[in-house]
Image (tube, rainbow, N blue to C red):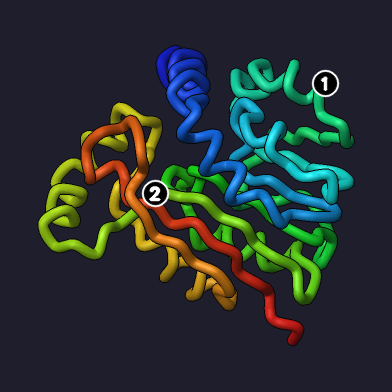
Amino acid sequence: MGIYSDWVLPRLLNQAMNTKVMAKERAKALSDVKGTVLEIGFGSGLNLPFYPDSVERVVAVDPSAAGAELARKRIAAAPFAVDYRAISGERIDAPDASFDAVVSTYTLCTIPDPVAALEQVRRVLRPGGTFHFLEHGLCPEPNVARWQHRLNGLQQRIAGGCHLDRPIDRLVRDAGFEIRELRNDWFRGPPPSKPWGYLYQGVATKPDS
């Protein structure tokens, strides 16, 4: 907690995450989202312009007050209702099986307890519901992975707890999801170094039983 983490960092991230390259990745990740949606790690609302017409309502959860302020204009411009809740992804205030889809973009790297958050995601999804994720994480190339582990402590200190080396696909599967689609790629733009740039973009489903 402090001026940097509470106010400066959210504004830096709002700028750094709002690029043309990021926009293309968000559009890919959100193209099939529909119905009543929960977004964890809502931040400054950068995903809102990329939700398709099939989305009816978005419940947005994020503990950052600065992010909520930065998101105000984007929320007002959204063509669907946006219900913002200042809570963390590990403690989602929603009934069981209440969402058609859940979205997470560049969130599982930073959320303090990703296992607890994914368990909450699974709980609030309806049977057959979809979890759409776009994250950066552990690279399978040994040399890159070594640098990710070396730089991870520094990254957490300067980037609000962001981890470079979380195995996103493994975390999703371990939470009880079935990954239906998964694309791994290198981020085509800033940040320029490979330890920051290995992407996981996919869709996972909650089993019917």
Mark 1 and mark 2 lie on one chain; the one further toward the N terminus is 1
- What residue lies at 75% left-to-right and 62% top-to-bottom? 124
**x then y, percent, for residue 137:** 35, 53
On screen, residue 125 versus residue 90, left or right, reads: right
Q: For mark 1, what is the residue?
A: 76
- What residue lies at 68% left-to-right and 38% top-to-bottom? 50
**What SS does tag 1 mark?**
helix
On screen, residue 41 versus residue 169, left or right, reads: right
| Circle number at residue 136 | 2
Quarter of the rendering occupied by the C terminus: bottom right
Q: Specify whether residue 2 is in view.
A: no
Compared to residue 94, the image places residue 50 above or below, namely: above
Compared to residue 64, the image places residue 167 above or below, namely: below
**x then y, percent, for residue 141:** 18, 62
Give residue 1's quadrant in the image: top left
- What residue lies at 52% left-to-right and 43% top-to-bottom? 25
Q: Nearer the viewer, residue 127 or 5?
A: 127
**What SS does tag 2 mark?**
strand
| Circle number at residue 32 | none
Task: Answer few, some or many: residues within 10 Å of disc 1's Cα (few below 14, many 20 plus, some between 14 and 19).
Answer: few
On screen, residue 164 versus residue 44, left or right, reads: left
Q: State the CA–CA distance, disc 1 to disc 2.
A: 29 Å
Task: Answer few, some or many: residues within 10 Å of disc 2's Cα (few below 14, many 20 plus, some between 14 and 19).
Answer: many
Residue farthest toward the bottom in the current orientation of the protein? 209
Residue type at the position of mark 2:
His
Q: Nearer the viewer, residue 18 or 94?
A: 18
On screen, residue 28 versus residue 8, left or right, reads: right
- What residue lies at 80% left-to-right and 61% top-to-bottom? 100
Residue type at the position of mark 1:
Ala
Give residue 71's quadrant in the image: top right
